[in-house]
Amino acid sequence: MSAKSTIGLVGLATMGANLARNIANKGFHISVFNRTTEKTEKFIQDFGKESKDKLHGSKTLKEFVASLETPRKIILLVKAGQPVDDMITELATLLDKNDIIIDCGNSHFKDTERRQNALASQGLNFIGCGISGGEEGALHGPSLMPGGSKAAWEKIRPIFEKVAAKDFAGKPCVIHIGDLGSGHFVKMVHNGIEYAIMQILAESYDILKTIGKFTNPELSKIFAGYNKNSNLKSFLIEITTKIFNKKEDGKFIIDYIKDAAGQKGTGKWTTEIAHDLGIYSPTINVAVDARIVSGDTSGRTMCQQFFTLKTSKTKLSPAAKKKLIKQVEDALELSTILCYEQGLGLIVKADREYKWNLNYAEIIRIWQGGCIIRSTYLKDLAIALGKDQKASGKIFTKIMKNLGGDKQKFWRKLMSLSLENGIPVPAFYATLNYYDSYAKARLPQNLIQAQRDFFGAHGYERTDKEGSFHTEW
């Protein structure tokens, strides 16, 4: 290679390999490095020609760094945690002042801040960039959430805007999120919302299959119908319709997949920081819990021997089945809206706490394409958060009217029906509790304050006078 590469990438697992191909296919020369040289060589052999020889492999890290134009721009897509620190340590000895390292893995935002501060003392720039869209998004256009140095962002901006997905208006799904670890924080919340919506979809499936007795092809048609709803049309529902129809050796694959959901930790991080910041995000919390209990297959098997469900076995007429489909749609629609609301609330509180000065409307906008939680509802939500007060007010009124309308009745009836039939609906129920808690002017925690004062003399505030009070109970 005579000319030097515009950018480099370390880590050729699925995400790294596909992002490198995306960058090269958009016309940028990119050097790649993987600790296993054979993997690098095979990658270049397999995909070098598709990008008209814009992919370049390096056998050593030193050779890789030397192949890049300055200031060097290096994307890391290695396993989160210690491997990121190890690679940064190695790279730092080879880099020059003002070079840029971009961590596109699922790193904790506090780790990103630590790394950024450490590298700044060496004159190096560090960007923590959330990336969503899975392997297909990485290849064809992801949603990108970079945070860190604004000056460093401007250096990588032309590349990232070219490779990112497009929103509903054709704009790239990438912005400079803000300072320090804000990019990885926003990606973490994105994943928390993802956990919540996926759990609600799973509960919808359980209700329709258990109570409605719908077949997999029927479920596919039902979810395809849901995907015509402007507040539900989304990537997750789209893939769900396809999942129900997929067969292998004449059998529906969904029926043979073990019911133990995996997780990589970002959902748990979201619940932890929500508690730290004092933000109520019950749907995200129970979605994490639901994955935990799904993984406890031995515990569930043992408990089935002792737990006896005293439940109804509802049998539905064709008309009642049709009504059930509508009940699930309404519950799914309102719950999904409130999942986004919980995530947004967490972003707003973190912004105020860490003083990042985030643009909420733009964050919602870049989730309109490429990412896992993309949906048509985000178009309305971005307007509601935008600067046009007239348009914002109109959309906000529309959203609130929807949440407070007749669809809520079906949602409540569905919860009763699910509980009567012994179907666990933790995410649906938690989301309804979220709505009810904020809709109620007075909660019963006044009793808790009285109890705390009784046994611990913690004191309490009153509604009729200012100050702190204690009672000798």
Image (spheres, helix red, strand yellow):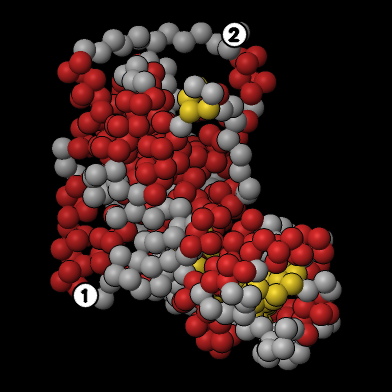
Residue visible at 68% across and 57% down in the picture: 13
Residue 271 lies, in percent from the top left, at 54, 49
- Other residues around mark 1 within 10 Å, as few (<14) / some (14–19) / many (≥20): few
Answer yes or no: is residue 129 visible: no
Q: How many numbered marks are there?
A: 2
Task: State the mark number for residue 306.
Answer: 2
252 displayed left or right of 96: left
395 displayed left or right of 240: left
Residue visible at 30% across and 38% down in the picture: 224
Disc 1: which residue: 388
Question: Which of the 4 image quadrants contains residue 40?
Answer: bottom right
Task: State the mark number for residue 104.
Answer: none
Residue 33 sits above or below residue 94 on the image: above
In this rendering, which labeled residue sits more in front, label 1 or label 2? 1
284 displayed left or right of 433: right
Residue type at mark 2 is Phe
